[in-house]
Image (cartoon, rainbow, N blue to C red):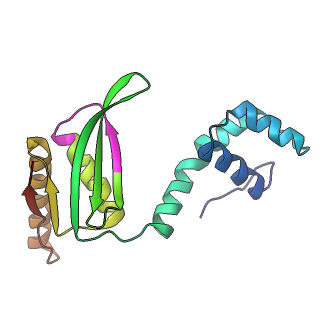
Amino acid sequence: MISFKWRHFQKDVILLVVRWYLSYSLSYRDIEEIMLERDLHIDHSTINRWVIHYSPQLENEFRQRFKRKAGNSWRMDETYIKVKGVWHYLYRAVDKSGDTIDFMLSKRRDKSSARAFFIRAIGSSGLPEKVVINKSGSNKSALNAINFQIILFHSLVYALMPIKIRQSK
């Protein structure tokens, strides 16, 4: 539950302002002017603090309440894209029906980045039965490390099946 205790504005105003900033390409000063037209005097720095404070909490609430269950078969790939003039790797996983499971930007294409992505995707959508990846060695080694953890966990407590890895060009 998101707490709005000790805030000078009502919950509805704060959520509206944060939603406008995250949904539309408006600056803090644009939102300040829009709210001024509605006779609410909110400084742009206050809006900035609200966005920084509430956007991670809103994302967590959304993921817990509204995230659809993903299928048992995932396809995962990564590509190289430019974000604000800097090249990054975009890791992306989709399920069998083409719905996006999760994505992540990373500066490196290595085992630790791939492992972090898989752990995040598994945490939000559950453990898949099968993952189809490209011929990347980092993805395969990350999945092997996760499978090793699953096997260790299986021997201690629960009966979990390791993830089947399929490589395709």
Residue in view at x 9 percent, y 59 percent = 165
Q: Position of residue 10 (x, y in %)?
A: 79, 55
Image quadrant assignment for residue 30: top right
Most extreme residue toward the right, as rendered? 39
Counting the numbered discs, the total is: 0
**Where does residue 135 sit, x and y in percent of width and height?**
8, 45
- Asked if residue 81 lies left or right of residue 134, the reply is right
The answer to whether residue 18 is above or below residue 160 is above
16 vs 22, left or right, is right
The answer to if 63 sits in the magenta stretch is no
Residue 113 to residue 62: above or below: above
Establish if 100 lies above or below 139: below
Name the residue rendered at 87%, 39% in the picture: 36
Q: Nearer the viewer, residue 95 or 126?
A: 95
In the image as oriented, which residue stretches furthest toward the bottom? 159
110 within the magenta span: yes
Between 77 and 53, the one lying in front of the other is 77
- To which quarter of the image does residue 144 belong? bottom left
Quadrant of residue 84 in the image? top left
Magenta span covers which residues? 103-112
* Place of residue 145 in the rendered image (x, y in percent of width and height, measured from the top left): 11, 53
Quarter of the rendering occupied by the N terminus? bottom right
Tell me which residue sits at (22%, 53%) in the image: 76
Q: Position of residue 166 (x, y in %)?
A: 8, 59
Which residue is rendered at x = 17% and y = 70% of the image? 129
